[in-house]
Image: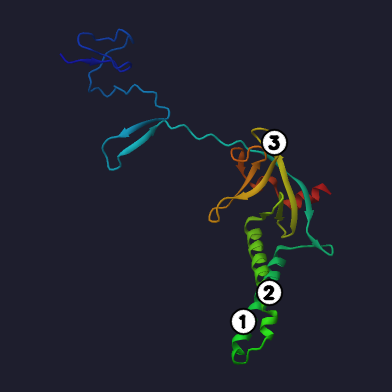
Amino acid sequence: MSYLFCPECLNRYKTLEHCPECDIPLLPPTAPQLRQHIDGDGNSAIQIGGDHQGNITINQPSPQKRPIALIQRETITPLTIAGIPVKNWWLFISAAIPLLANLLSIIDFWLKLPTVTSRHNDYGNLLMYGMMIGALLLITAAILQRGRYITLPFGRTVERDKDGNLYLTRIGGTCGVCGAPVRVKTVGPKEYRQTRVICTENPDQHWAEFDRTKLGDVGEEYRNRQ
């Protein structure tokens, strides 16, 4: 007679039909009810057979959600020129002017190449700086058009409302872990930038991804405060 196994404790018996410890019927070793007696939560196992062999995780625990910080706009200041609200499309126009001027200068330089004078050297550096400023304005306008905000140093943020008006804001709040003040900052390598709400006490461990949509439209909030 072959051995019988207990499906609970995995002990085997030769002459018994019930497990004396678990008080359940014993099963033959080929019975489909026989299960592996392991704790399963987060344990590794080996996949045998099939095209994809390797380690698998049994009952992998779901990742814990990072505590969300309580944030709000502490200050909202509309950007204006002579009392007129600054529009995001103004940045596109401001960026196009120096870029276009630099392009015309290059065309003029090549058209007059045989009779080049020192006049080109006089304003060459000025045009170069203008092109750099234009490129910076163009990048800023594109970011605001797509993401509706851009972070600045010293805890400041430029935000665009649904009407295209720009505002200078300061976003603050409380860390959901330790209760310390938080700040909004864009971090990470150039190819993977991420805006985070970072705790000022423990910035390496206490942080959350910044979700601007939870703050609502900056223009509506500014008007409601008036």
In the displayed structure, would residue 177 be above or below residue 23?
Answer: below
Return the disc, 1 or 3, that comes first in the chain's sequence. Answer: 1
Residue at the bottom extreme, as displayed: 115
SS of the residue at dot 2? helix
Q: Which residue sits at x=66%, y=59%?
A: 144
Q: Which residue sits at x=71%, y=60%?
A: 164
Hey, what amino acid is under mark 2?
A: Pro
Q: CA distance from mark 3 to mark 2?
A: 45 Å
Hey, what amino acid is under mark 1?
A: Ile
Residue at the left extreme, as displayed: 1
Which colour assignment does the render follow?
Answer: rainbow
Label 2 environment density (alpha carbons within 10 Å; few <14, some 14–19, many ≥20):
many
For disc 3, the marked residue is: 180
Q: Which residue sits at x=28%, y=43%?
A: 51
- Left or right: residue 76 compared with residue 209: right
In the displayed structure, would residue 124 be above or below residue 174?
Answer: below
Residue 162, by quadrant, is bottom right
Hey, what amino acid is under mark 3?
A: Ala
Label 3 environment density (alpha carbons within 10 Å; few <14, some 14–19, many ≥20):
some
**Residue 173: image location, x then y, percent:** 71, 40
Q: Which residue sits at x=63%, y=89%?
A: 116
Q: Nearer the viewer, residue 37 or 122?
A: 122
Q: CA distance from mark 2 to mark 1?
A: 12 Å
For disc 1, the marked residue is: 106
Where does the N terminus fall, quadrant-wise?
Answer: top left
**Residue 19: image location, x then y, percent:** 29, 10
**Residue 124: image location, x then y, percent:** 66, 79
Residue 126, by quadrant, is bottom right
Return the disc, 3 or 2, that comes first in the chain's sequence. Answer: 2
For disc 2, the marked residue is: 98
**Residue 57: image location, x then y, percent:** 39, 33
SS of the residue at dot 3? loop
